[in-house]
Amino acid sequence: MKLAVIGKGTVGSLAVLHFLTYTDWDIDWVSDPNTPTTAVGEGTTIRVPSALANSILEFSHDDLIAMNGTPKVGIWKENWGGGKKYLHPFPIDLSGLHFNAIEFQNKVFEMLQGNQRITMVNERVTDPQSYSADYVMVCSGSPKDLDEYNILDSIVVNSAYVTQCFWDTPTFNYTLTLARPWGWVFGIPLQNRCSIGYVYNSDFVSLNEIKEDVKNVFQQYNLTPSDTTNHLEFKNYVRKNNFTSKVVYNGNASFFLEPLEATSTTTSDDVSRFAYDMWNGNISVDEANRKHLHNIEEVLDMIALHYCNNIVYRNDFWDNAIRISCNRIKNSLDTNPDFQNLIHNSIQGTENMLSVFGLSDPVHYGTWSWKSWNINVKNLQIKRTLKYLMGEK
């Protein structure tokens, strides 16, 4: 069998590794020489390090350091919900990653040189269906139009302003996730720099106001901003029919959700897993599409949890964010018994949700385990809001 992976970005690289590891297929790795890959830092959940370590390349800590990456031991949160500062920690035997996307892509490309199953192809593919391969995975970045996509209107941000702050050594080993007056700020610590990104909604605030407010974060964390900046405007979307019997879309070609909780690489890994199962006859095309959309819905609920109340900041942005997010959570509580069960037991602080769900494996909803739901529902201090949305006193 032959698979074509179109795109050499982070998701394309992960997809190539996945199918090299779990199949014996030949792979055309196709890229448009006139289209640059995305040059931003990235954070991951705990899924990606395991995938890399167990891949055909057997990634090590030395490889992580070589691409200026750092382990991610958790997520530091400030000013969300009730305003409490807390660490959402990862288990001691697991970690996520912070890495430079371009250096990661180059590292994978370098390590796969000479692999007899891969053919590097420099070509612009306009019709994946007609590409000469048994299967095609399109990881070619954001679509030019969104006719084939659903716009996700429950996400309350649409822009980001990113500044690189260079340092001699990292001063923290977790992702910063800081609620601010007009959105939130991420901090991704790499070996040589920290990426600070202010994620906001341009309908409520100007870029100049964002540039002014982010100075407070630079000062708080003793960071020196450089002139290396980037301003992004984005829509949040998911492809209506992501899987066909031959062609599957992944990464930004499949979906885009705001970066809160760093869900993109884990969701992309799920797309590769669903594609593997579909192409090997384990699930149908319809089931693959259903599973993918179900994943997106769960992540949307997880994101909405952060915005459903805030006592630190009250302005037009937060009033809008609270309204939209509460509507999202209320609808999911009314229509999804699993979500209702999860929220109810998170409010109670149930220590073992395995018995609640009757499952032998840890419960995951979105990219969070049940322990993560307990931690965040408690520390975001939104139990009263969730009880109100559930109709409880």
Image (cartoon, rainbow, N blue to C red):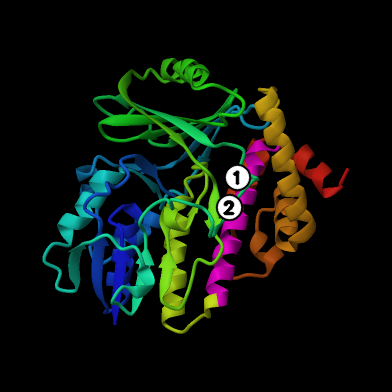
x, y percentage for residue 234?
49, 40
> In this orientation, which residue lies closer to the viewer: 243 or 322?
243
Q: Position of residue 22 (x, y in %)?
A: 32, 74
Labels 1 & 2 near each other (Cβ < 8 A): yes
**Callout 2 environment at 10 Å: few (<14), some (14 to 19), or many (20+)?**
many
**What's the distance in space between the residues labelled 1 and 2, CA to CA?**
6 Å
Q: Is residue 381 visible?
A: no
Asked if residue 249 is positioned above or below residue 143 in the image, the reply reads below
Quadrant housing the N terminus = bottom left
* Residue 286 - label: none
Question: Disc 2 marks which amino acid?
Answer: Val
Q: Amino acid at mark 1?
A: Ile
In this image, 49 relative to 244: left or right?
Answer: left
Q: Position of residue 100 (x, y in %)?
A: 29, 42
Which residue ends up furthest to the bottom in the rendered image? Answer: 281
Instruction: Please tell me the numbered disc located at residue 299.
Output: 2
Residue 264 in the image: state x and y as whole percent. 46, 51
To which residue does mark 1 refer? 303
**Residue 182 placement, left or right of 136:** right
287 within the magenta span: yes
Secondary structure mostly seen in magenta is helix
Give the residue drawn at x 25%, y 56%. 32
Magenta extent: 286-308
The residue lying toward the viewer, choosing from 265 and 231, is 231
- The residue at the point 49 percent across, 70 percent down is 243
For this rendering, which residue is in front, 361 or 57? 57
| Quarter of the figure that contains the C terminus | top right
Judged left or right of residue 239, residue 134 is left
